[in-house]
Image (spheres, grey):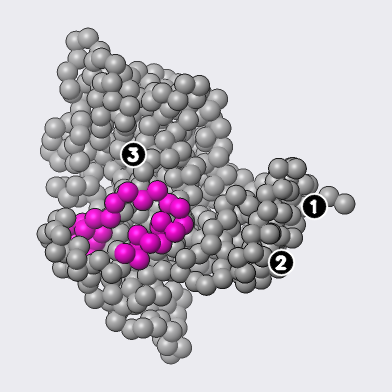
Amino acid sequence: MSSFAQRCGIHDAAREQAVQRLGRLISEQGLELVRFAWCDLHGVLRGKTLVASAAERALREGVGLVSTLMLKDSSDRTAFKVFEPGGTATLPGFGQANNLMLLADPGSFRQLPWTPGTGWLRAQPWFQDGTPVELDTRRVLQRALERLAQAGFTMQCGLEVEFHIYKLQDAQPGLDPMQAAWPGPAPAVSLVHPGYNLLAEGWFDLAEEPLRIVQRTAQALGLPLLSLEVELGPSQVEAVFDATDALTAADNMVLFRNAVRMALRRAGYHATFMCRPPFPNIMSSGWHLHQSLLDARSGRNAFMREAPEPGTDATHAAHTLSAAGEHYLAGLLHHARAMTVFCTPTANGFGRFRPNALAPQSVLWGRDNRGAMLRVVGGCGDPATRIENRIGEPAANPYLYFASQIHAGLDGIARRLQAPPATDAPYAGGGEHLPTSLGEALAALREDAVLGEAFGRDFIAYFTRIKESEQQRVAAAEDPDEFQRREYFGRI
C-alpha cells in the first residue's frame, strides 16, 4: 500500500533514503521530540511536536493539522464562518474545521540549539486527497519562481532585517490567569541600549548579551549571518545575511525570526519584529530586500551591464542596469502601490512611511539613495549589482514579499517598461505616494489586474478577506495603542 507522501507524488527512492537517514540520525542523537513546523499567512511558524519515535512515519504519512489555521487573522480569530452553510464556499477543500496534512522536507532538518533533545522540520500542507493546498504561501512563492524560470531567470536575495530587543521585566510575562485575554497583554520591558548613537561600539557592548544569543542561534541553525549592528532607535538592532537563492532566503527569514524570539525569551529578553513598537521616541524597523536576477543558464547577474548606455547619465536606469534590470525596476515601480500590502502587511507598519526617516514615502527610485523606495546598488561590471526594495517591514511573510517582487518585475520585463529618471530628492513631493493605511493598501491590490492574475484571484480574495478582518478590528478599537500592543508587540 502506498504512503500518503507517495500519493502526493513527492516520495521517490531518493526521498525514502533521506527519510531513513534522518530516522537514524534522530536515534543516534538521542532526540526526544521533533517539531513539524509550517509558516502561516502572517509568517508565523505553527505545527505539531511529535515524539522522536513517531517522526519517521510522519515523514511518509503526514501529520494532521486543523484547516482553520490557514484562515486566522493576526489575532488568531478565524476570518471565515466555517460552521455555517456557504461559509467556506470560496475555499474548496475547507470547511467544518476539517483536517489538512503536513508533509515535511527531510532535508530541512535542524537540531534546535536553545532547547535540549529537539529537532525541527519545515513542512507544507496538503489536502487529504493528496492534492497541494495552493493557498499555502510557500507554494505561492514556488509558483512565482516557476514563472521566473520559464522566463530564463533565477532570483538571488540578501536580507537586512531591523528589529527590537528588550529586557523582560517579568520572568514569565502574560502568564497571570487573571490577565488572560484574546490577545493577551503585552509584556513589560526595558531597553537593552538607549539608542540615538548609530553603530556605537559602547551601545553594542550594552546589547552584547542578547546579540550573542542571536548570533549563536543563527549560526547553530546554519543561517548565513554576516553582521549584527546597533541601529539608530532605542533597543533597535539589525541582522544582515549573505545572498542566497530566493526560496532559501525566505525559508531562512521564517526560521530566523521565530528562532531568535524563542531563544531570547528563554534568556529573559523579548524580541519583536513589529515595525513600530508602542513607545515614544522609537524608530521604525524596516526589512530591506536586496534582489537580483541571474541568467538561469550562465549564472550571470542579469541586472549587470558592462558599460553605460550611450547618451545616459546617473539619473538614467540604463546607465547602471541592463535592459532586463531596467524593465524589472520599472515593473516594481508600476505595481508598487498594489504590492505594498505584501511588503508591509500590518496596520502598524504604515506609520513608517514618513519623510526623512530612511524610509520611503513615494514611488521613486534612486541611485544609492536610502530615501527612495527602490535603491539601485552597484555599477557597470559589478556582479553584485542589485535593486534594494526599502518598502518592507520585518513582520512581512517572506514568501509573499518575494512573490510580489517577481510578479511585478516580470510584468516590467514582459512589457519592456521604462523607468523614470532617478530621484535625488525623495521627500520633495515627487512621485505617487505609497498607501498610508492597511485599508488603502488592500484597495490598491484589488485594483491591480496584473498582480491579481499572477497571484490568482482565489488567493487574492482569501488574503484580502483575512486582512480586512484585521483592518476592521483596528478601526473598531477603543484604544488603538493598546490594540497594537496586544496584536503586534506581544505576538510578532
Say if the magenta span includes residue 281: no
Q: Which residues are magenta?
A: 212-237
The residue pinned by badge 3 equals: 290
Question: Disc 3 residue type?
Answer: His
Q: List x then y, in percent, for residue 280.
A: 18, 68
> Mark 1 packing: few (<14 Cα in 10 Å), some, or many (20+)?
some
Residue displayed at 28% across by 55% down = 228
Q: Give whichever of 248, 152 is nearer the camera.
A: 248
Q: Secondary structure at mark 1?
A: loop
Point out the frontmost of discs 3 and 2. 2
Residue 213 is one of the magenta-drawn residues:
yes
Q: Tag on residue 3?
A: 1
> Which numbered tag is attached to residue 381?
none
Do labels 1 and 3 touch, CB within 8 Å?
Answer: no
Callout 2 amino acid = Ala
Q: Closer to the camera, 165 or 147?
A: 165
